[in-house]
Image (spheres, helix red, strand yellow):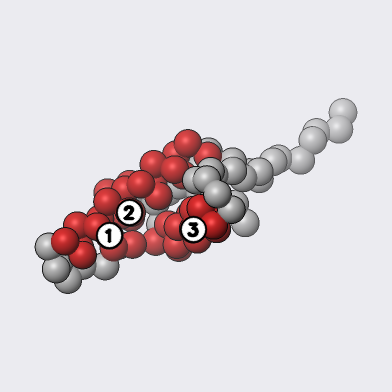
Amino acid sequence: MPSTSESGRPLRGQAREIVYNVHQFFKRQKEEHKMDINVARVTSEATGVSERVITRIVKEGIESLAKGSLSFSTPNGKRGKERKE
């Protein structure tokens, strides 16, 4: 299942990178200020993307950094059936 926003549309690569960066920002804030927050939940509230999707995006970011550079793919969304006439 593709990662989608609350509107149900797939998040494109650039949007996924923004969500990743917001997550990283909150993660740094938590560590620097010794805050007791759930980073995925706060990121979800800030971006309107579900916590589960954020978890997937962060995992994709970590995997892409391990390969050398931060990059995100645009997932293939659900497509309607082609109408036969």
Residue 6: mark in rendering:
none
Q: Is residue 83 above or below residue 32?
A: above
Question: Looking at this rendering, what residue extends furthest in the front direction?
Answer: 68
Residue 27: mark in rendering:
1
Which amino acid does the dot numbered 2 rest on?
Answer: Gln
Verify CB contact (< 8 Å) between mark 2 and mark 1: yes
**Residue 53 visible, this angle:** no
| SS state under label 2 | helix
Q: Position of residue 74 (x, y in %)?
A: 59, 41
Is 45 displayed left or right of 16 in the figure?
A: left
Q: 41 or 82, which is in the foreground?
A: 41
Q: Residue at x 26, y 67 (%)?
A: 38
Q: Position of residue 75 (x, y in %)?
A: 61, 45
The first of marks 3 and 1 along the sequence is 1
Q: Quadrant of the C terminus?
A: top right
| Mark pair 2, 1: CA separation | 5 Å
| Mark pair 2, 3: CA separation | 11 Å
| SS state under label 1 | helix
Q: What residue would you read off at disc 2?
A: 24
Which amino acid does the dot numbered 1 rest on?
Answer: Lys
Q: What residue would you read off at disc 3?
A: 62
Tell me if mark 3 has few (under 14), some (14-19) or many (20+) residues whose alpha carbon lies within 10 angstroms of its own. some
Q: 85 or 3, which is in the foreground?
A: 3
Q: Residue at x 24, y 57 (%)?
A: 28
Question: Looking at this rendering, what residue extends furthest in the top direction?
Answer: 85
| SS state under label 3 | helix
Is 10 displayed left or right of 27 in the figure?
A: right
Q: 43 or 31, which is in the foreground?
A: 31
Q: Position of residue 7 (x, y in %)?
A: 45, 44
Q: 58 or 1, which is in the foreground?
A: 58
Which amino acid does the dot numbered 3 rest on?
Answer: Ile
